[in-house]
Image: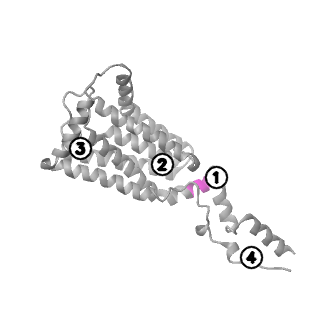
Amino acid sequence: MTRALSVADTTPAHHNPHPDPTAPSAAVLPLGMACSALAAGLGFALHDRSGRSEIQVVDHHWLTWMGGPHGGVYAALADVLNWFGGPLGAVLPVALLLLLIGRRRWWSVAYLVTAYLLGNVVVVQVLKHLVDRPRPAHPLVRVDHGSFPSGHSAGAALLVVVVGAVLVPAARRRSWWLLGGAFILAMMWSRTWLHAHWLSDTVAGASIGAGAALLLWRAFAPLLARERISRGLPGDQDGVRRRHFGDVGSLEQRVDGVRDLSG
């Protein structure tokens, strides 16, 4: 006796209970919007000089706490992070760019370049000139104009999200986010420890970097998924099989269907 596969046996790919393991989670969009809103709110509050007082009180308390001593292992760590956000901070994105070009992952290249140009260059520099906030007195490292937001913090957060999106398998992303979050917090601490930024500058910087990378990850998600499938990257075999076989239900359903069709 022969029977055709039922509708339940031929569930479309977009109804599959096992989604593409490379896709961003549902939290990416709201989290990106929340980070962007936080940075915008701090920027508006600090742009209005009369509204700076409450934020400045917290910033002064934090800076007093970071007053010293500036020596030993803490100073060494802060100096390393300062270099990471400076010259080395430019080397790592370029190295990531060359790696993606070498693998011919063109949509990942587009995502990386767009994220850095928009988040770490355009938004950060525009806000520096719009808010025009003076830096803390006597910074311990060379700094440019404008304390708000922290470019080092923005670059660190953006790099963590972009690497997590294009290189880290979904099964390992939770560990990556924990490590990346610790790295971002360390960068924020180092900028205030060196008196290069106020605390709110670093919060806004990290929010800008993470927000831009998360929102663009969501926007590029279909293209990144298509790229992974076309390049045959690890983690996409289930997606490839679903495309070829039409996602015809569970293994038992497929076996039963083949037996029935052949019997």
Image quarter of the C terminus: bottom right
The residue that mark 4 highlights is: 5
- First reached walking from the N terminus: tag 2 or tag 3: 2
Residue 44 drawn at (x, y percent):
21, 52
- First reached walking from the N terminus: tag 4 or tag 3: 4
Residue at the spot x=64%, y=52% of the render? 232
Give the SS element for disc 2: helix
Residue type, numbered disc 2: Val
Give the SS element for disc 3: helix
Task: Reply above or below: 262 against 96.
Answer: below
Mark linked to residue 86: none
- First reached walking from the N terminus: tag 2 or tag 4: 4
For the residues labelled 2 and 4, the Cα–Cα distance comes to 42 Å
The residue that mark 2 highlights is: 109
Task: Reply above or below: 199 against 22.
Answer: above
- First reached walking from the N terminus: tag 4 or tag 1: 4
